[in-house]
Image: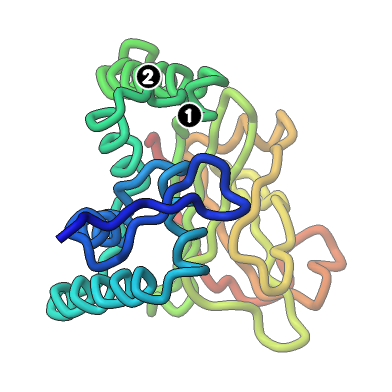
Amino acid sequence: MAAPQPVEIEGVPGAMSIPADTEDDRILAAEYILGLLDDETSRALEARMNVEPALRDSVAVWADDFAVMTDGIPEELPPPGVFVSISEVLFGTERAPSLLQRLGIVRMFVGAVAAAGLAFVVISSGLLGPANQPEFVARVEAQDSSLRFRAAYDADTGSLHLVRLAGQAAPGRSLEFWLIAGSNAPVSVMVWPTGADDERIVLPAPIAAGLPGGTLAISDEPEGGSPTGAPTGDVLAVGQVSPA
Protein backbone atom coordinates (compact mmCIF):
# COMPACT_ATOMS: atom_id res chain seq x y z
CA MET A 1 0.00 0.00 0.00
CA ALA A 2 1.42 3.36 -1.04
CA ALA A 3 2.33 5.82 1.71
CA PRO A 4 0.16 8.93 1.99
CA GLN A 5 1.47 11.77 -0.13
CA PRO A 6 1.98 15.18 1.47
CA VAL A 7 0.01 18.05 0.01
CA GLU A 8 0.94 21.73 0.20
CA ILE A 9 -1.44 23.74 2.38
CA GLU A 10 -2.96 26.65 0.53
CA GLY A 11 -1.99 30.03 1.99
CA VAL A 12 0.82 28.59 4.15
CA PRO A 13 4.07 28.57 2.12
CA GLY A 14 6.21 25.53 2.80
CA ALA A 15 3.59 23.82 5.01
CA MET A 16 2.77 20.29 3.91
CA SER A 17 -0.30 18.33 4.90
CA ILE A 18 0.04 14.65 5.83
CA PRO A 19 -3.09 12.58 6.52
CA ALA A 20 -3.85 12.52 10.25
CA ASP A 21 -4.00 8.75 10.47
CA THR A 22 -0.23 8.49 10.15
CA GLU A 23 1.96 7.78 13.18
CA ASP A 24 3.93 10.98 12.52
CA ASP A 25 0.78 13.07 12.70
CA ARG A 26 -0.34 11.47 15.96
CA ILE A 27 3.05 12.26 17.50
CA LEU A 28 2.89 15.78 16.09
CA ALA A 29 -0.55 16.28 17.62
CA ALA A 30 0.68 15.09 21.01
CA GLU A 31 3.70 17.40 20.87
CA TYR A 32 1.41 20.28 19.94
CA ILE A 33 -0.75 19.72 23.03
CA LEU A 34 2.34 19.49 25.22
CA GLY A 35 3.72 22.74 23.79
CA LEU A 36 6.87 21.10 22.46
CA LEU A 37 6.67 22.44 18.90
CA ASP A 38 8.44 25.56 17.74
CA ASP A 39 6.37 28.51 16.54
CA GLU A 40 6.72 27.74 12.83
CA THR A 41 5.67 24.09 13.20
CA SER A 42 2.77 25.04 15.48
CA ARG A 43 1.47 27.58 12.96
CA ALA A 44 1.70 25.05 10.17
CA LEU A 45 -0.16 22.46 12.23
CA GLU A 46 -2.90 24.97 13.15
CA ALA A 47 -3.30 25.84 9.48
CA ARG A 48 -3.70 22.15 8.66
CA MET A 49 -6.32 21.72 11.41
CA ASN A 50 -8.44 24.35 9.67
CA VAL A 51 -8.77 22.09 6.64
CA GLU A 52 -8.21 18.58 8.06
CA PRO A 53 -10.95 17.33 10.42
CA ALA A 54 -9.03 14.11 11.11
CA LEU A 55 -6.04 16.09 12.40
CA ARG A 56 -8.32 18.24 14.57
CA ASP A 57 -9.81 15.08 16.02
CA SER A 58 -6.36 13.67 16.74
CA VAL A 59 -5.36 16.84 18.61
CA ALA A 60 -8.66 16.78 20.56
CA VAL A 61 -8.13 13.14 21.57
CA TRP A 62 -4.65 13.89 22.90
CA ALA A 63 -5.98 16.90 24.80
CA ASP A 64 -8.62 14.73 26.50
CA ASP A 65 -6.10 11.98 27.30
CA PHE A 66 -3.61 14.37 28.89
CA ALA A 67 -6.38 16.10 30.84
CA VAL A 68 -7.51 12.75 32.34
CA MET A 69 -3.91 11.97 33.34
CA THR A 70 -3.74 15.15 35.44
CA ASP A 71 -7.21 15.02 36.99
CA GLY A 72 -5.88 13.73 40.31
CA ILE A 73 -3.09 16.29 40.58
CA PRO A 74 -4.00 19.46 42.52
CA GLU A 75 -3.32 22.71 40.70
CA GLU A 76 -0.31 24.64 41.89
CA LEU A 77 1.17 27.84 40.49
CA PRO A 78 4.91 27.30 39.90
CA PRO A 79 7.42 29.94 40.98
CA PRO A 80 8.05 32.64 38.33
CA GLY A 81 11.60 31.43 37.62
CA VAL A 82 10.67 27.85 36.71
CA PHE A 83 9.88 28.51 33.04
CA VAL A 84 13.08 30.53 32.60
CA SER A 85 15.15 27.77 34.20
CA ILE A 86 13.57 25.12 31.95
CA SER A 87 14.25 27.27 28.88
CA GLU A 88 17.89 27.58 29.90
CA VAL A 89 18.26 23.81 30.15
CA LEU A 90 16.33 22.93 26.98
CA PHE A 91 17.25 25.76 24.64
CA GLY A 92 20.32 27.35 26.17
CA THR A 93 18.62 30.73 26.51
CA GLU A 94 20.23 33.15 28.93
CA ARG A 95 18.25 34.41 31.88
CA ALA A 96 17.51 38.11 31.44
CA PRO A 97 18.54 40.21 34.44
CA SER A 98 15.60 41.26 36.60
CA LEU A 99 14.62 44.89 36.97
CA LEU A 100 16.04 44.89 40.50
CA GLN A 101 19.33 43.54 39.22
CA ARG A 102 19.47 46.07 36.38
CA LEU A 103 18.94 48.89 38.83
CA GLY A 104 21.47 47.48 41.28
CA ILE A 105 18.83 47.30 44.01
CA VAL A 106 19.81 43.76 44.98
CA ARG A 107 23.34 44.88 45.79
CA MET A 108 21.96 47.93 47.59
CA PHE A 109 19.66 45.70 49.64
CA VAL A 110 22.47 43.32 50.58
CA GLY A 111 24.60 46.30 51.57
CA ALA A 112 21.79 47.76 53.64
CA VAL A 113 21.29 44.46 55.47
CA ALA A 114 25.00 44.27 56.21
CA ALA A 115 25.04 47.87 57.42
CA ALA A 116 22.03 47.24 59.64
CA GLY A 117 23.71 44.19 61.12
CA LEU A 118 26.87 46.17 61.82
CA ALA A 119 24.85 48.96 63.42
CA PHE A 120 23.09 46.44 65.66
CA VAL A 121 26.41 44.97 66.80
CA VAL A 122 27.87 48.41 67.51
CA ILE A 123 24.83 49.65 69.42
CA SER A 124 24.23 46.43 71.36
CA SER A 125 27.90 46.25 72.35
CA GLY A 126 27.80 49.84 73.63
CA LEU A 127 30.65 51.04 71.40
CA LEU A 128 28.82 54.29 70.74
CA GLY A 129 27.46 54.63 74.24
CA PRO A 130 23.75 55.07 75.11
CA ALA A 131 21.72 57.12 72.64
CA ASN A 132 19.33 59.58 74.30
CA GLN A 133 18.89 57.43 77.39
CA PRO A 134 17.04 59.27 80.15
CA GLU A 135 19.14 60.38 83.08
CA PHE A 136 16.21 60.59 85.52
CA VAL A 137 12.94 58.71 85.84
CA ALA A 138 9.89 58.68 88.09
CA ARG A 139 6.66 56.78 88.59
CA VAL A 140 3.96 59.24 89.56
CA GLU A 141 0.97 57.35 90.95
CA ALA A 142 -1.92 57.41 93.36
CA GLN A 143 -1.90 55.22 96.46
CA ASP A 144 -4.57 52.98 94.96
CA SER A 145 -2.90 53.07 91.50
CA SER A 146 -6.04 54.55 89.96
CA LEU A 147 -3.87 57.28 88.45
CA ARG A 148 -0.41 56.37 87.13
CA PHE A 149 2.15 58.16 84.97
CA ARG A 150 5.72 57.36 83.94
CA ALA A 151 8.25 60.20 83.60
CA ALA A 152 11.70 60.21 81.97
CA TYR A 153 14.03 63.19 81.65
CA ASP A 154 16.78 63.44 78.99
CA ALA A 155 19.38 65.97 80.10
CA ASP A 156 20.96 66.18 76.62
CA THR A 157 17.78 67.52 75.07
CA GLY A 158 16.14 68.96 78.20
CA SER A 159 13.04 66.93 77.32
CA LEU A 160 10.66 65.47 79.89
CA HIS A 161 8.67 62.54 78.53
CA LEU A 162 5.40 61.78 80.31
CA VAL A 163 3.28 58.71 79.59
CA ARG A 164 -0.18 58.13 81.05
CA LEU A 165 -0.59 54.54 82.21
CA ALA A 166 -3.93 54.73 84.01
CA GLY A 167 -6.57 57.21 85.09
CA GLN A 168 -7.65 60.61 83.82
CA ALA A 169 -9.06 63.92 84.99
CA ALA A 170 -12.59 64.13 86.33
CA PRO A 171 -15.17 65.64 83.96
CA GLY A 172 -14.70 69.42 83.75
CA ARG A 173 -11.38 69.24 85.61
CA SER A 174 -7.68 69.11 84.64
CA LEU A 175 -4.60 67.30 85.88
CA GLU A 176 -1.63 69.57 86.57
CA PHE A 177 1.96 68.42 87.10
CA TRP A 178 4.13 70.11 89.73
CA LEU A 179 7.80 69.83 90.66
CA ILE A 180 8.71 70.13 94.33
CA ALA A 181 12.47 70.61 94.80
CA GLY A 182 13.52 70.31 98.44
CA SER A 183 11.67 72.85 100.57
CA ASN A 184 10.85 75.11 97.62
CA ALA A 185 7.26 75.88 96.68
CA PRO A 186 5.71 73.67 93.99
CA VAL A 187 6.42 74.86 90.44
CA SER A 188 3.97 74.09 87.63
CA VAL A 189 5.42 71.79 85.00
CA MET A 190 2.41 71.42 82.69
CA VAL A 191 -1.36 70.95 82.48
CA TRP A 192 -2.10 67.52 81.04
CA PRO A 193 -4.07 67.74 77.76
CA THR A 194 -7.46 66.05 78.00
CA GLY A 195 -7.37 62.57 76.46
CA ALA A 196 -3.61 62.59 75.82
CA ASP A 197 -1.54 59.46 76.45
CA ASP A 198 1.96 60.66 75.68
CA GLU A 199 3.55 64.11 75.94
CA ARG A 200 7.05 65.57 75.64
CA ILE A 201 7.97 69.04 76.91
CA VAL A 202 11.27 70.89 77.12
CA LEU A 203 11.79 72.07 80.67
CA PRO A 204 13.09 75.60 81.31
CA ALA A 205 16.55 75.52 82.87
CA PRO A 206 15.42 76.67 86.37
CA ILE A 207 12.86 73.84 86.57
CA ALA A 208 15.25 71.27 85.12
CA ALA A 209 17.85 72.19 87.75
CA GLY A 210 15.45 71.16 90.53
CA LEU A 211 14.49 67.86 88.93
CA PRO A 212 17.26 65.56 90.36
CA GLY A 213 16.06 64.35 93.74
CA GLY A 214 12.84 66.31 93.44
CA THR A 215 9.24 65.12 93.57
CA LEU A 216 6.68 65.19 90.78
CA ALA A 217 3.08 65.58 91.90
CA ILE A 218 -0.29 65.74 90.15
CA SER A 219 -3.12 67.86 91.50
CA ASP A 220 -6.79 68.11 90.62
CA GLU A 221 -7.41 71.59 89.19
CA PRO A 222 -10.13 73.56 87.43
CA GLU A 223 -10.26 73.00 83.69
CA GLY A 224 -7.21 74.61 82.12
CA GLY A 225 -5.11 74.50 85.29
CA SER A 226 -4.63 76.32 88.56
CA PRO A 227 -5.76 79.97 88.40
CA THR A 228 -3.30 80.99 91.13
CA GLY A 229 0.03 79.44 90.02
CA ALA A 230 -0.08 77.08 93.02
CA PRO A 231 -1.95 73.83 93.62
CA THR A 232 -5.57 74.50 94.58
CA GLY A 233 -7.08 71.00 94.52
CA ASP A 234 -6.31 67.62 95.98
CA VAL A 235 -2.92 66.02 95.33
CA LEU A 236 -3.83 62.86 93.42
CA ALA A 237 -0.43 61.25 92.76
CA VAL A 238 3.24 61.71 93.67
CA GLY A 239 6.55 60.21 92.56
CA GLN A 240 10.21 60.62 93.54
CA VAL A 241 12.62 61.53 90.73
CA SER A 242 15.61 59.21 90.76
CA PRO A 243 18.57 58.44 88.47
CA ALA A 244 17.69 56.04 85.63
| Disc number for residue 98 | 1
Can residue 121 be seen here? yes
Determine whether 133 is above or below 143 in the image: above
User: What is the quadrant of the C terminus in the image?
Assistant: top left
Residue at (35, 69) in percent of width and height:
55
Residue 113 in picture, x, y percent from top left: 37, 24
Q: Quadrant of residue 62?
A: bottom left
Counting the numbered discs, the total is 2
For this rendering, which residue is in front, 92 or 27? 27
For the residue marked with disc 1, what is the amino acid? Ser
Q: Position of residue 158 (x, y in %)?
A: 64, 31
Q: Who is closer to the viewer here, 105 or 62? A: 62
Q: Secondary structure at mark 2?
A: helix
Q: Amino acid at mark 2?
A: Ala
Dot 1 falls on a residue whose secondary structure is loop
Q: Earlier in the sequence, mark 1 or mark 2?
A: 1
Q: Which mark is residue 17?
A: none
Do the residues bearing badges 1 and 2 touch, measured as CB atoms within 8 Å? Answer: no
Q: Which residue is mark 2?
A: 119
Whether residue 88 sits left or right of residue 135 in the image: it is left
Q: Position of residue 211 (x, y in %)?
A: 56, 38
Q: x, y (%) of residue 194?
A: 72, 73
